[in-house]
Image: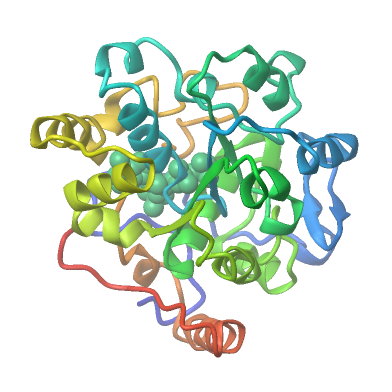
Amino acid sequence: MASEVPIAKSCPKCDLPDPLKRNKSVDVSSYELPGAYTYEGVPLAYFTKVEHIEKIRNLHLREDDVIVASYPKTGTTLTQEITWLIRNNADTEAASKSYNYVRVPYLENCFPPESDGILLLEQLTPPRHLKTHLPWHLCPQKSIIDGKHTKAIYVMRNPKDALVSYYYFYCSCASFGQFPGTWSDFFELFLMDKLCYGNILDHYVGWWAMRDNPNILLLKYEDILKDHAGQIRHIGKFLGYDLSDDTVETIRNFTTFKKMSKNPMTNYTSIPEDIDTSIVPFMRKGQVGDWKNHFTVAQNELMDMIINKKLAGTGLTFEYDSTNN
Ligand code: PPS
């Protein structure tokens, strides 16, 4: 773990080039996301229009629609790809010809207009999938818990690694203003509850409270990395599929970090105007435990206190270390 205020650097174990040699801080107190506003306590950015959120909340989804939900950087893309393949006969050929964000629209995204999540969803033929980073209270709850039974899969990741991943994404993503600061600046934004989609732990707790609903499956990124095939089977079972060993292996093999990071349909190299992967690759490391290369001792102590406080009494725990990387 870093012992002093860190200058963001790449992991010594990792062979990526050092993407960010930063030692200059930004003024975090006056820093705002482009077009930032707060909706029912949740900080959002310009790419989600206020009127869109109300539309989403009241959206009538189909019985056979599947929502992949998450706080950003917790394993969404991986879960999306696994889910789409399960429900499309493990058709890796089709998945190799279509961008993941076209097959699984980003619901609350409104820009550019042709990438409007609701519009893209309407253009899909069933079985339809959609992705959202919205907290539970802003989601189309009625479609999930009332008569229609749309299924939702919510994936979580240990919050320390998720924040580190989010920092690098903030730096590379134009929609997040290509954040110019250091890791410590970003951590300050977290402490000030200024990150887009709000506090990661509040987000988790909101969805965690729904875990006993039969239409909602909660997953952990670390479990997928530990037992990739087992978690594919687990998702399949939740969606009503009894997957053969061959199908599971096809999906596992297609969704490894190695494969997905090289696949232009999943690695987000296709939209450089929004995600500049030359600053930091979207598929950065795909590991458990990179937080140790970023958090200072003091940041880690503070983070542990926040985690303990926010998760007290919920029964929700995370793995912060892995031997499987
Ligand atoms: S987003 O923008 O919120 O949709 O991002 P999300 O997909 O949730 O998270 C990105 C992080 O997930 C890692 N990732 C993977 N890890 C292991 N295996 C596979 N196949 C995989 N695909 C994506 C990705 O590398 C990001 O994590 P970091 O720690 O930054 O590498």
Q: Residue at x 22, y 39 (%)?
A: 242
Above or below, 107 against 119 in this view is below
The picture quadrant for ligand 1 comes to: top left
Q: Residue at x 55, y 47 (%)?
A: 69
The quadrant of the image that shows the N terminus is bottom left
Above or below, 162 against 279 in this view is below
Above or below, 25 against 83 in this view is below
Percent across and percent down for residue 104 are: 52, 27
The color scheme shown is rainbow
> Residue at the left extreme?
246
Q: Is residue 63 left or right of residue 162?
A: right
The answer to whether residue 285 shows anywhere in this view is: no
The quadrant of the image that shows the C terminus is bottom left
Q: Quadrant of residue 249?
A: top left
Percent across and percent down for residue 165 are: 47, 54
Depth check, front residue: 35 or 124: 124
Q: Residue at x 32, y 28 (%)?
A: 85
Percent across and percent down for residue 312 are: 56, 89
Q: Is residue 229 left or right of residue 302?
A: left
Q: Is residue 56 left or right of residue 220?
A: right
- How many marks on residues? 0
Q: Residue at x 80, y 40 (%)?
A: 58
Depth check, front residue: 253 or 185: 253
The answer to whether residue 118 shows anywhere in this view is: yes
Q: Quadrant of residue 252?
A: top left
